[in-house]
Amino acid sequence: MLYLDSTMTWAHVGTVILAAFLASFVECVEALTIVLAVGTTRGWRPALTGAGAGAFVLAVLTLAAGPALRRIPLPSLQLVIGVLLLVFGMRWLVKAMLRASGVIGLHDEARIYAQQTAALARDRGGDRVALLTAFKAVILEGLEVIFIVIAMGAHGLLAPAAAGAVLAAALVILAGFALHRPLARVPENTLKFAVGVLLSAFGVFWMGEGLGFSWPGRDLALLGLIGAVAVLARLAVAVIKRRSNMRTLGTAMQGAAIALVLVTGAIHFVDAPSSFGDATYKGVLFVANGIAAVVAAFGISRGRRWASGLGILVAGGALVGYVISRTIGLPGLAPELWISSPLAVLSLAVEAACIAVLVQSARSMRYRDAQP
């Protein structure tokens, strides 16, 4: 029987296994496409050697990182990983939402396979190029899975997270080599949507845990968070589809970026009076954060590149300041409790999401500017 400590339930473990399984399944499908292209074009020996070497490196990274995480205090680890999972999950979820709404094209494994096969056929680098191509594919796709496995499996759940990932990898490998063609019919975007929902919900849950917040129903609250994130994401897809002028990724990201950066600024405006009571400079920083958020939102609405950078500074600076105030303490102030009010949890969640959306928004602006 799988060992569970007093803070873990099957709802918690099930979420970990499912997230690791789905993430691994998606990434393995993408890696398999390239390995198959290498094998059919250059031979299976370099393809399998490169893929095997990549899998070995990923396994070593997982085994090395797991024990190291156990040395970090659980609340601090939960908070840091929670923020990272939320940012990572939002990145998956935003892309899946945009693909589901038709703003950007779906991931086409058959087309990628044809492109890789054509490129390898033209290249005359021999087995070395084939081996490196397969190795790079496994490493690049596998690193995301490794992060999810390590993050979700920290402090006692590494085994079930790894089991979910290994099971997915085994299924993809068996199916791919039985069919000898890419798994183009896999509903990849649906799976990415599910992974994004799971990671985002788990990130919010762990942020609350790290801040000392007691979730109603304990680990069962995960199910409520997953449902809430899924519903909000589906509503967002429906809204995007209804906008007839929604033709580019930049348009879709712009509204989300403006909303999140304004909420970030509003939270600091609301908390500014009490911050002046702590220290004058702290209150000034809170007001400056709110003003900068308004300026950034205006700049984003006008399509200015600097605005995304300012928004990232607003949200990122607030996150860094929060961590400092709870660890070593701000200048002249003692360290505060990790969770001082429900507003603190909301602020951290919004700031993490804001950074993820603003990074994607900046990329969208560069793509739009590059269009003729």
Image (cartoon, rainbow, N blue to C red):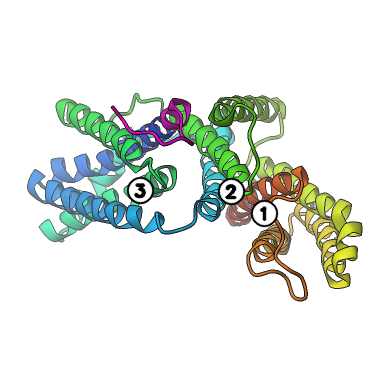
Does residue 106 lie above or below 54 as drawn?
above
Q: Main secondary structure of the magenta part?
A: loop
**Residue wearing tag 3:** 146
In the depicted view, which residue is nearer to us: 235 or 307? 235
Q: Quadrant of residue 27?
A: top left
- At horizontal 29% and vertical 43% (from top left) the residue drawn is 31
In the depicted view, which residue is nearer to us: 139 or 327? 327
Does residue 252 lie above or below 277 as drawn?
above
Kindly check if marks 1 and 2 are in contact, taking CB atoms under 8 A apart as contact.
yes
Magenta segment: does it hold 11? Answer: yes
Q: In terms of secondary structure, where does tag 2 sit?
A: helix
- Identity, as a three-letter code, of the amino acid under mark 1: Trp
**Residue wearing tag 2:** 210
Q: Report how far apart the C-alphas of labels 3 and 2 lie in the structure.
A: 22 Å
- At horizontal 21% and vertical 43% (from top left) the residue drawn is 35
Q: Which of pointers 3 and 2 lies earlier in the amino acid sequence?
A: 3
- At horizontal 70% and vertical 27% (from top left) the residue drawn is 239
- At horizontal 39% and vertical 54% (from top left) the residue drawn is 70
Q: Which mark is residue 338?
A: 1
Magenta range is 1-15
- Identity, as a three-letter code, of the amino acid under mark 2: Gly
Q: Position of residue 262 (x, y in %)?
A: 80, 49
